[in-house]
Image (spheres, rainbow, N blue to C red):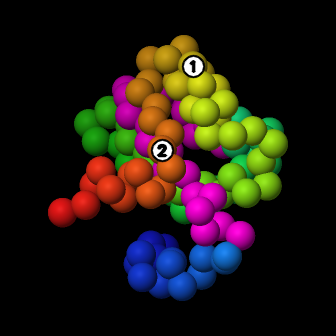
Amino acid sequence: MRRSLGRWRDKVTSSEEGNRIIITVLGLDQVGIIAMISNILADNSINILDISQTILQGFFTMVMVVDISQSNIDVKELREILVGKGQEMGLQVTVQHEDLFKYMHRI
């Protein structure tokens, strides 16, 4: 079931404000992409707040919104880990703070 952004924003807690990170993953579809990303997040106490994933003609795309407020690593470390593991699987992974993502994608 898909939630609208407006309703989702209403459910954001104050601990999540300023701690949300946007993770995007692009590449050829293969077994284990979501498992790889979610295991890294779980191992670092990072909560997945929202996820959208689709496969278009064999091309995998995913966007995640995560909360790093309880994590023991910072955004730079998370980026290094995810980008490195993504490269091993032939994937393009980006990790951005929510504010930067919003700024870059505004109309």
x and y percent of residue 38 in the render? 66, 42
Q: Residue at x 45, y 35 (%)?
A: 94
Q: Is residue 97 magenta?
A: no
Residue 101 is left or right of residue 56, and the answer is right
Q: Work out whether 17 lies above or below 48.
A: below
98, above or below 74, in the image? below
Count numbered badges in the picture.
2
Quarter of image, res 88? top right
Residue drawn at point x = 51 percent, y = 50 percent: 97
- Give the labeled residue for mark 2: 96
Q: Is residue 72 visible?
A: yes
Q: Residue at x 50, y 78 (%)?
A: 9
Q: Residue furthest top?
A: 88
Image coords of residue 17 (percent x, y) = 61, 68
Q: Amino acid at mark 2?
A: Gln
Query: Where's residue 8, x and y in %?
Result: 51, 77
Q: Are marks 2 and 1 in contact (CB under 8 Å)?
A: no
The foreground one among 89 and 84 is 84
Q: Which residues are magenta?
A: 15-39
For mark 2, give the secondary structure.
Answer: strand
In the image, which disc is placed on residue 57?
none
Q: Which residue is mark 1?
A: 84
Q: Residue at x 66, y 31 (%)?
A: 77
Occupied quadrant, residue 81: top right
**Disc 2 from disc 1: Cα separation:** 15 Å
Q: Nearer the viewer, residue 44 or 56?
A: 44
| Residue 22 inside the magenta-drawn segment | yes
**Residue 74: percent from the left, percent from the top?**
69, 40
Q: Is residue 64 visible?
A: no
Identified by mark 1, the residue type is Gly
